[in-house]
Amino acid sequence: MAEHAILASLAVHKSSERRSLCSQSPYACAGADGAELGLALIGGSSSPSAPKHLLELSRFRMDGALSEDYKCYVASRGGPVIQAAAKLDARKLAAQCRSELEAFKKRAAGNSFDVTPESMCSSVADIQTFLRDVGTLVKGGNDCDGV
């Protein structure tokens, strides 16, 4: 559910029709707060699977404050997130994002979600780079305040 909130919020934010979408579809009323809430729920979870789920969010193309918060949540996880990064498959994550976006657009049929997979989903190369750099993020995590 938290991952869906992130996907929906990003789709609305990146859509050219974002100002009028909320009046057309309840999916579009999520706003940026939905992504922040979804990230906080996953990033703050004490579940043993939380580091893996947190890293799986690298499939989404995040920018601005959401991206910075995401990196801080990852950095705050320490060793478990480094171990989880080594086990993830960037190709599967990229394909998962494309599949989720397609399903989201079908559920919101008739609405103007004109976002492309390229604007919403990280490339395989970007995901691989992020997963490879998790250790560096963890070591530099003291630049984050309050996460």
Image: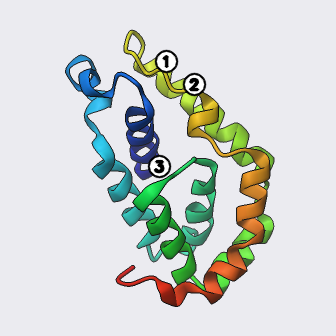
C-alpha distance separating marks 3 and 2: 15 Å
Residue with the mark numbered 2: 102
Q: Is residue 97 left or right of residue 46?
A: right
Label 2 sits on a secondary structure element that is helix
C-alpha distance separating marks 2 and 1: 6 Å
Residue 3, label in figure: 3
Q: Residue at x 72, y 55 (%)?
A: 127
Residue 106, label in figure: 1
The spot of residue 49 in percent (x, y) is 58, 69
Labelled pair 3, 1 in contact (Cβ < 8 Å): no
The spot of residue 73 in percent (x, y) is 49, 73
Q: Earlier in the sequence, mark 3 or mark 1?
A: 3
C-alpha distance separating marks 3 and 1: 17 Å
Q: Residue at x 38, y 33 (%)?
A: 12
Label 1 sits on a secondary structure element that is helix
Label 3 crowd (10 A; few <14 / some 14-19 / many >=20) = many
Q: Which amino acid, mark 2?
A: Glu
Q: Which amino acid, mark 3?
A: Glu
